[in-house]
Amino acid sequence: MFVVEDEPSIRQGLCDVLTFRGYRVSASSNGREALETALREGFDLVVLDVMLPELDGFALCSALRKAGRDVPILMLTAKGAEEDVLRGFESGADDYVTKPFSVRELVARVHAMLKRARKLDSASFRIGPFEVHPDRGSARSDAGEIELSAREIQILRLLAEEPGRIVSRRTLLREVWNMNNVEHVETRTVDMHIAKLRKKLGADGARYLSTVRGQGYRWADSRR
Ligand code: CA
């Protein structure tokens, strides 16, 4: 696990509590150095502060995703900065906690993220014309192979479990984002991810994945 935080007391506190919980922890206080380290070493999770010297958390997160790293990233955002949450998700972060955070909440998030990441290793599944391979991070159809993020695979898995039924944004946030207290900014996050996923799936995305206004999303039941 990799903790990137320039505030010494918070960094040390995070390292102490995560080490105490049995995780092996490395730390960095500089954005640019942290990016180099994260690209060089395979961490199972990154706890990432937003405001950092040389390279901020958003840029670091984007750079990791651009380099093809799908390591789970938990962002530490400032209280009251909702736009930071959205920007974090846009940069490719998987989850966030707001500063000042409770240690219990942070540990719970870390634990859930790691559990989710492991769950993703499970077997492939079918949805519409696609055979989804979580281990490869892709889906295959007659039209070819499409690369998918871990989050997109989770969304498809959820839709595959409910063919023909409406899956609400709230359900998506709870099951895919692990969020129970839904805020406006977060439902926009779901819409953004769905739009991107639909685009990736091309003509089949438009055909199967529909928006049910004011309610959520539905994957067309292929038996009909
Ligand atoms: Ca900072």
Image: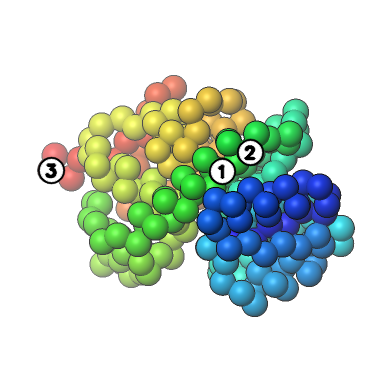
Mark 1 highlights which residue? Answer: 107
Question: Are the two marked residues, 3 and 1, in contact with CB atoms closer than 8 angstroms?
Answer: no
Q: What amino acid is at disc 3?
A: Arg
Q: Which residue is the extreme one toward the left?
A: 223
| Residue 51 picture location, percent across and down | 81, 49
Spot occupied by residue 52 in the image (x, y as percentages of width and height): 82, 54
Number of other residues with Cα within 10 Å of mark 3, as a class: few under 14, some 14 to 19, many 20 or more: few
* Residue topped by disc 2: 103
Residue annotated with mark 3? 223
Q: Is residue 130 left or right of residue 105?
A: left
Q: CA distance from mark 3 to mark 1?
A: 43 Å
Place of residue 68 in the rendered image (x, y in percent of width and height, measured from the top left):
56, 69
Residue 98, quarter of picture: top right
Earlier in the chain: of badge 3 and badge 1, it is: 1
Q: Secondary structure at mark 2?
A: helix
Q: Nearer the viewer, residue 95 or 170?
A: 95
In which quadrant of the rendered image does the N terminus lie? bottom right
Question: Do tag 2 and tag 3 residues touch (Cβ < 8 Å)?
Answer: no
Give how far apart the Cα atoms at labels 2 and 3 are: 48 Å
Q: Nearer the viewer, mark 2 or mark 3?
A: 2
| Residue under the point 48% across and 40% down | 177
Q: Secondary structure at mark 3?
A: loop
